Image: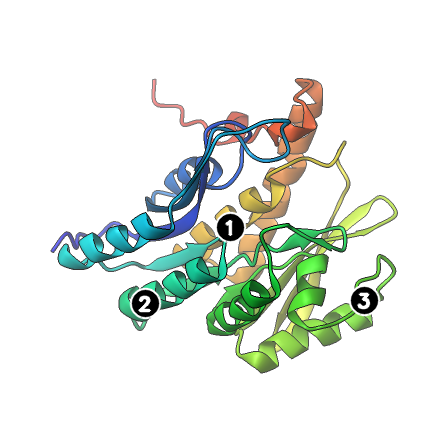
Amino acid sequence: MYKGKQKKLAVINDFSGFGRCSLTVSLPIVSSFGIQCCCLPTAIFSNHTAYESYFFDDYTDKMQEFTKNWELLELGFDGIYSGFLGSAKQVDIVINFISRFKGENTRLIVDPVMGDNGVLYSTCTDEMRKELKKLAALADIVTPNLTELCFLTDTPYSRDLSRDQIIKMAAQLCGNGSKNVVVTGISKDNVISNLIYSGEGYCFVSSLKQGIERAGTGDVFSSVVAAAVVNGETLRDAVLKAVRLIEKAGRISDELEIPPENGICFEKLIKLDLY
């Protein structure tokens, strides 16, 4: 039922009405690749948590109702992409979702949202970190930032980790089961690098820093990568597309004086000229 020839990507993430992150980023970006974006919300926010106040509604129980109904419709997906998960129970729900919906040719992309700048988010308990390790081990592509890479590999965090140390940690993740690892946002001087690592080798994709650090950039990056690989592009080409979009959108955001908590203005770069 509901097969069709158009590719479908299930995106499991929170929904923030304002702030350019999570599902409100993934939906337009995935759609711009000609892929149907099928959203499974983990939580509903009025705006993301970098703002002073926000409304929050947990969707843990409702996630399971989504899954039941999608099963009744006999849905299948060309890709599954998971982002922010708010609890160990949600991670278990996603692992169960994968067991039900991941077909032989389904690409699984896991963004293990845990923390940044050496600090775990308040929602990421020790139990949740253990469950996220299990989820990452299932991934065709896992996209941790440097903080998340350290916590996934039980490595002390440092801003001064060498490239060799980062490569070694990526190799450890692959050894644990992840097929490909993309370590995002490796910052040094005025350059941002991303490591692509697999059992067949590794490479770095780099760009110059553009303006200030902005919320939701990781969501933009992973959404582009997920959509591109589901469309059959190589992982390196997918990362290059993500880097170029973020680089250009960062410049536009500075020109338009977009506040950093409101993310990057990617919309200017994905408009379709239909008229």
The residue indicated by pointer 1 is 84
- The image position of residue 54, as x and y in percent, is 54, 29
Tag 2 near tag 1, CB within 8 Å: no
Q: Nearer the viewer, residue 102 or 29?
A: 102
Q: Residue at x 88, y 60 (%)?
A: 160
- In the picture, the quarter occupied by the C terminus is top left
Residue closest to the far left: 1
Q: Amino acid at mark 3?
A: Arg
- The image position of residue 155, as x and y in percent, is 75, 71
Tag 3 near tag 2, CB within 8 Å: no
Label 1, residues with CA under 10 Å away: few <14, some 14-19, many ≥20: many
Label 2, residues with CA under 10 Å away: few <14, some 14-19, many ≥20: some
**Is label 1 in a helix, a strand or a loop?**
loop
Visible residue check, residue 235: yes
Q: Which mark is residue 102?
A: 2
**Is label 2 in a helix, a strand or a loop?**
loop
- In the picture, the quarter occupied by the N terminus is bottom left
Q: Earlier in the sequence, mark 1 or mark 3?
A: 1
Q: Amino acid at mark 1?
A: Phe
Quarter of the view holding residue 78 = bottom left
Q: Nearer the viewer, residue 145 or 46?
A: 46
